[in-house]
Amino acid sequence: MDITGACWGLQGAEFVLTVRALKANGDFEDYRSFHLKQEYQRVHQARYQEGFTLAA
């Protein structure tokens, strides 16, 4: 994380360290699958529940 000219905020630095730890432990693919499922539910599933129809 010691890159010339880089300015890290706490949230960004924590994320980078978390991803590095996940890769080092071999857990990155499991995390990625979980993250994609959560993103799908948050963005798409809640919007397009039963009873909601798109206009033609």
Image (cartoon, helix red, strand yellow):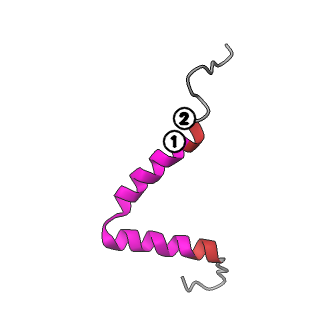
Q: Quadrant of residue 5?
A: bottom right
Image coordinates for residue 24, horizontal then vertical, percent:
34, 74
Image coordinates for residue 34, horizontal then vertical, percent:
42, 52
The quadrant of the image that shows the C terminus is top right
**Label 2 vs label 1: CA separation?**
6 Å
Crowd class of label 1 (few under 14; some 14 to 19; many from 20; radius 10 Å) = few
Q: Residue at x 35, y 56 (%)?
A: 30
Region in magenta: 14-41
Nearer the observer, 3 or 42: 42
- Residue receiving disc 1: 40
Decide if residue 36 is on the left or right side of residue 14.
left
Nearer the observer, 37 or 23: 37
Labels 2 and 1: the sequence-earlier one: 1
**Does residue 24 belong to the magenta stretch?**
yes
For residue 42, above or below residue 34: above
- Residue receiving disc 2: 45
Direction front: furthest residue: 51
For residue 5, above or below residue 23: below
The quadrant of the image that shows the N terminus is bottom right
Q: Residue at x 32, y 72 (%)?
A: 25
**Does residue 30 belong to the magenta stretch?**
yes
Direction left: furthest residue: 26
For residue 49, above or below residue 24: above
Tell me, yes or no, whether the two marked residues, 2 and 1, touch with CB atoms within 8 Å: yes
Magenta residues: mostly which secondary structure? helix
Which three-letter amino acid code belongs to the residue tagged 1?
A: Tyr
Which three-letter amino acid code belongs to the residue tagged 2?
A: Gln
Q: Quadrant of residue 2?
A: bottom right
Image coordinates for residue 31, horizontal then vertical, percent:
40, 58
Describe the element under mark 2 as helix, strand or loop: helix
